[in-house]
């Protein structure tokens, strides 16, 4: 009996030291990605750089070869190499948002002749935007690990980006979204116009094999609700997405992150007309993430084969960042389904003190699958919500075409289906939690930088 126990103990220790591929369930944290981004190794084997300023981070990112960069303390995107913090007037002296808006006649049409200053404001807005972009954008190259060290490791006002890079890991950082001092007003965008901020907290363009884990994404203390009011009677939108994945990016895992108090949260695919570069790519896995007070796009998917499981969503009609769902006349939603998207959702916990239609929005996507998700702790038929919205949009388009004698859009010939053409279990191994309360508790405990077990990473001492 003793010999048997000894063998069992030895076997258990061996498995703990060298677990076979895919054997470790995604919750709690396995210290390696699960899903589409599972092969990201980052800067493993390369030197370690410790950075505390924007200049040090920029210089470390510019070094060649694999590398690991440890971020300590707060790094400010608007800080110059000699320590000066830049603001709107430093980027474009004389620019004035009120004067810029006054050049839209009736809030609808721009005119250089509306006021004497309009031509100047138009030029200053573009110049200021370009100057700010050059200052705050930091690009992560291939074969890099970017790791936050300590509770105060954060990037404030940095536009972190990947541009054609591959094999990248970003973990343990708080990323406070940049304020776009030169956001542009588009009166023709939507029924009442829209703002187009330029800078994201993290933007991935044509990137691949990427793992984003245990980070926190937020607008910080600069919520859009506190901004001046624009022509549509709503606050000026000074933030773009928190984490956007675009232009043929592929093989990405987003795990155990916190996304807090933001409007347009994250895109997968940036436009309906990008199918030539996005079809067959945009493969992304989201699990263990907290979406707290995030109004929409968590994520909003075009073209991608996206797996969304064991995430916890919560919001309120009257919260710090109010969420107003479609059935209440607003734009808020959790999952967003767009053109040719193939989203496979399962075991997500949704909470909201309004109608359950907030769980999903559908922009003419006819393929969607959900398995055993919950709304306020009870099972919810997410597929039925997605189907209802697809059928309503289809009926409206067919009626419009009939009334005008025009041809309806091609997508109206499609039938809604739960066959998304792929299944995660056929691609990679994972083990989802299947209890709503356990999903909620686990996400709250494990998501975000504070939950990252840094001692287990064998980090070198500072200096």
Image (cartoon, rainbow, N blue to C red):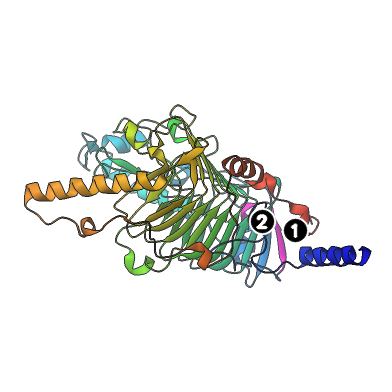
Q: Nearer the viewer, residue 178 or 285?
A: 285
| Label 2 crowd bin: few (<14), some (14–19), many (20+), radius 10 Å | many
Q: Residue furthest front?
A: 1
Q: Is residue 189 above or below residue 225?
A: below
Is residue 328 toward the left or the right of residue 458 in the image? Answer: left
Please indicate, yes or no, whether residue 212 appears anywhere in the rendered image. Answer: yes
Q: Residue furthest left?
A: 405
Instruction: State the image coordinates of residue 1 (x, y, percent, origin top left).
Output: 91, 63
Q: Nearer the viewer, residue 126 or 192?
A: 192
Of the two numbered discs 2 and 1 in the rendering, the one whose residue sits closer to the viewer: 1
Instruction: State the image coordinates of residue 325 (x, y, percent, origin top left).
Output: 37, 35
Q: Which residue is mark 1?
A: 457
In the image, what residue occupies the spot 69% across and 50% down?
Answer: 452
Q: Nearer the viewer, residue 396 or 191?
A: 396
Q: Is residue 271 above or below residue 128?
A: below
Q: SS of the residue at dot 2? A: strand
Quadrant housing the C terminus: bottom right
Q: Quadrant of residue 66?
A: bottom right
In the image, what residue occupies the spot 53% across and 36% down?
Answer: 377
Is residue 90 toward the left or the right of residue 394 in the image? Answer: right
Q: Is residue 142 magenta?
A: no
Is residue 407 toward the left or the right of residue 348 in the image? Answer: left
Q: SS of the residue at dot 1? A: helix
Q: Quadrant of residue 168?
A: bottom right
Please indicate, yes or no, whether residue 153 appears anywhere in the rendered image. Answer: no
Instruction: State the image coordinates of residue 175 (x, y, percent, origin top left).
Output: 57, 47
Is residue 55 toward the left or the right of residue 315 in the image? Answer: right
The stretch in magenta equals 47-55
Question: Cβ–Cβ below 8 Å for labels 2 and 1?
Answer: yes
Q: Which residue is mark 2?
A: 147
């Amino acid at each position: 009996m003793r010999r048997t126990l000894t063998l069992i103990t030895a076997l258990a220790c061996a498995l703990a030291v060298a677990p076979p591929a895919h054997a470790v369930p995604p919750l709690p944290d396995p210290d390696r990605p699960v899903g589409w981004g599972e092969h990201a190794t980052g800067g493993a084997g390369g030197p370690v750089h410790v950075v505390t300023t924007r200049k040090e981070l920029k210089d470390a990112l510019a070094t060649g070869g694999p590398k690991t960069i440890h971020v300590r303390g707060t790094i400010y995107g608007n800080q110059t190499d000699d320590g000066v913090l830049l603001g709107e007037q430093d980027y474009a002296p004389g620019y004035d948002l009120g004067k810029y808006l006054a050049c839209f006649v009736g809030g609808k049409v721009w005119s250089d002749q509306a006021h004497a200053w309009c031509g100047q404001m138009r030029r200053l807005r573009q110049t200021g935007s370009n100057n700010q972009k050059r200052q705050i954008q930091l690009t992560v190259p291939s074969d890099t690990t970017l790791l936050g060290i300590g509770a105060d490791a954060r990037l404030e006002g940095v536009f972190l980006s990947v541009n054609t890079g591959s094999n990248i890991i970003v973990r343990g950082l708080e990323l406070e979204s940049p304020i776009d001092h030169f956001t542009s007003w588009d009166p023709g965008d939507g029924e009442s116009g829209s703002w187009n901020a330029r800078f994201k907290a993290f933007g991935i363009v044509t990137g691949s094999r990427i793992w984003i884990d245990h980070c926190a994404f937020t607008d910080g203390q600069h919520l859009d609700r506190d901004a001046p009011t624009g022509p549509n009677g709503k606050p000026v939108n000074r933030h773009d997405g928190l984490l956007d994945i675009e232009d043929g990016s592929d093989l990405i895992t987003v795990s155990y992150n916190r996304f807090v108090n933001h409007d347009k949260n994250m895109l997968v695919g940036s436009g309906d007309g990008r199918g030539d570069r996005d079809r067959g790519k945009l493969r992304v896995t989201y699990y263990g993430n907290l979406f707290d007070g995030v109004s929409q796009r968590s994520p909003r998917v075009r073209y991608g084969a996206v797996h969304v499981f064991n995430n916890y969503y919560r919001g309120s009609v009257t919260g710090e960042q109010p969420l107003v769902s479609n059935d209440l006349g607003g734009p808020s939603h959790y999952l967003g389904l767009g053109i040719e998207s193939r989203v496979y959702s399962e075991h997500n916990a949704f909470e909201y003190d309004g109608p359950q239609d907030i769980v999903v929005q559908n922009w003419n996507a006819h393929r969607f699958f959900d398995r055993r998700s919950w709304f306020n702790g009870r099972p919810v038929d997410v597929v039925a919500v997605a189907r209802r919205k697809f059928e309503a949009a289809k009926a409206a388009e067919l009626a419009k075409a009939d009334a005008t004698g025009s041809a309806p859009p091609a997508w109206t010939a499609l039938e809604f289906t739960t066959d998304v053409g792929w299944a995660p279990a056929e691609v990679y191994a994972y083990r989802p939690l299947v209890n709503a309360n356990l999903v909620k508790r686990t996400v709250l405990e494990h998501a975000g930088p504070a939950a990252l077990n840094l001692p287990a990473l064998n980090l070198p001492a500072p200096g």
